[in-house]
Image (cartoon, grey):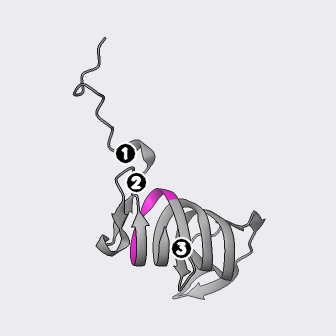
């Protein structure tokens, strides 16, 4: 949670709340993008010969949800604006600037300023497993 800019990309599901701007580039089409539960429609664009579907959502103040096979999401909150995001799937955080804290892949909390992208986003089944009390061997 914080204020600044966060960019992630990959095959992801991302959700949270934001006061600010959301820019999504859906490279393959078919992404689902909702703001406050309302399905959003993209603008079709051709970039370097490739068709992309662009969502440029300004002055968002509420919950968002994004699901897609190959997209890039940029979340921007400045001044008194804030953002909070959770993401899972396969991908990476490629930019993180501003002030705030983050948790990644079940790890402890870190300051945004300590982040060195890219930071891989891993599926939940690849998270480190906690060690059971008593050292690791479970009684049988």
Q: Quadrant of residue 76?
A: bottom right
Mark 3 burial class by Cα count in 10 Å: few <14, some 14-19, many 20+: many
Q: Of all residues shown, which one is farthest toward the right?
A: 38
- Residue assigned mark 2: 122
Picture coordinates of residue 114, whole percent (x, y):
29, 71
Q: Is residue 30 visible?
A: no
CA distance separating discs 2 and 1? 6 Å
Q: How far is the residue under mark 2 from the one under mark 3?
A: 17 Å
- Asked which secondary structure carries label 3, the reply is strand
> Magenta span covers which residues?
87-97
Compared across the picture, whether 1 is left or right of 26 comes to left
Would you name the residue on which mark 3 appears?
Answer: 73
Residue 96 in magenta? yes
In this orientation, which residue lies closer to the viewer: 121 or 130? 130
Q: Residue furthest front?
A: 80
* Separation (CA) of disc 1 from disc 3: 23 Å
Camera-nearest residue between 66 and 58: 58
Q: Is residue 36 left or right of residue 6?
A: right
- The circle drawn on residue 126 is 1
């Amino acid at each position: 949670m914080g204020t600044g800019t966060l960019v992630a990309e990959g095959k992801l599901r991302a959700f949270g709340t934001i006061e600010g701007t959301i820019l999504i580039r859906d490279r393959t089409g078919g992404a689902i993008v909702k703001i406050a539960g309302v399905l959003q429609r993209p603008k079709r664009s051709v970039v370097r010969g490739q068709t992309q579907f662009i969502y440029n959502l300004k002055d968002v103040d509420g919950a968002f949800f994004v699901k897609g096979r190959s997209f890039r999401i940029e979340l921007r909150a400045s001044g008194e604006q804030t953002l909070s995001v959770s993401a899972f799937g396969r991908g990476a955080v490629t930019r993180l600037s501003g002030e705030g804290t983050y948790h990644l892949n079940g790890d402890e909390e870190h300051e945004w300023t300590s982040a060195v992208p890219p930071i891989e986003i891993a599926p939940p089944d690849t998270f480190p497993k906690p060690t059971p009390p008593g050292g690791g061997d479970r009684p049988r």
